[in-house]
Amino acid sequence: KLKESYSTLEQKVDERTRQLTALNMIATTTNRSLELQEILGSTLDKVLEIMQFQAGAIRLLDAAEEKLVLQVSRGLPLDFIQKYKEVSAGEMIAGQVALSGRPVIIEDAQKFPQPVSPIMDLGFVSIVAIPLKSKDKVLGTLTGASRAPRSFSPQDLELLVSIGNQLSIAIENATLYTKAKAMVEQLKEADRFKSEFFSNISHEFKTPLTAIIGYSELLLGKIRVKNNFFLFIMRKRND
């Protein structure tokens, strides 16, 4: 029994080490950039590597339209991607996850009498889909699929949920960064418009005043006015 206990403990330590290593890899990936598409693509690649999935996808929720929009995918044919670029909340496995806010695990779809998702028609039989959530708000979904039946332990699900939480934080940071960058560009454009406006106004004011000064000089020259204080003031104003 002591030997069995030691073996069990060793397995738990190995599993925990695997989880921590995986989470560290994901953290490194998500912290590498603030560009959303780069974060999503790199994270999906790491998830497929860690969990040994043959295909995967990340969708983000368009709350206004109540649709999940495909952002990045791996291992899926182009016609499938185009057909299911957008799915309604509640539609397909990803839509069900977004609607419920809970993970869905299918270890062997061959046990079902009918396909439970269009992805099964591509030969995938094992699927895991998790919600990407921030403070109980669903931001999107992450899905992984395998062509062979898989058995997922509670630790596997815990790891995927932890990855989802990390990714959700990165998505929010990237979204804030994108909004801030857009605001800076708007401010730059507004400042450029202001500069052009004042430059044009200044030019419009100066143009008639220059003509008036020229005409005044002509008049002053003709009548030989000795005191040209008025002309001096006008020149100063124009300068």
Image: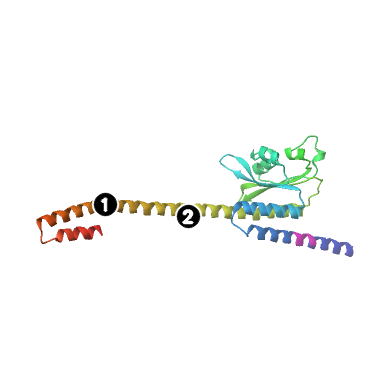
Q: Amino acid at mark 2?
A: Val
Does residue 16 belong to the magenta stretch? yes
Per the rendered image, the range of residues in magenta is 14-18
Would you say residue 231 is visible in this rendering?
Answer: yes
Q: Which residue is mark 2?
A: 184
In the rendered structure, the answer to whether residue 144 lies left or right of residue 189 reads: right
**Residue 84 to residue 212: above or below:** above
Q: Residue 109 placed where, x, y %?
A: 79, 41
Q: Residue 37 placed where, x, y %?
A: 62, 51
Q: Residue furthest front?
A: 222
Closest to the observer: 19 or 31? Answer: 31
**Label 2 vs label 1: CA separation?**
35 Å
Q: Which residue is mark 1?
A: 207
Local packing at callout 2 (Cα closer than 10 Å; few below 14, some 14-19, many 20+) is few
Q: Name the quadrant of the N terminus.
A: bottom right
Q: Residue 59 placed where, x, y %?
A: 65, 45
In the rendered structure, the answer to whether residue 3 lies left or right of residue 135 reads: right
Q: Residue at x 76, y 40 (%)?
A: 122
Q: Residue 135 placed where, x, y %?
A: 60, 51
Does residue 238 belong to the magenta stretch? no
| Mark 1 secondary-structure assignment | helix
Secondary structure, magenta segment, majority class = helix
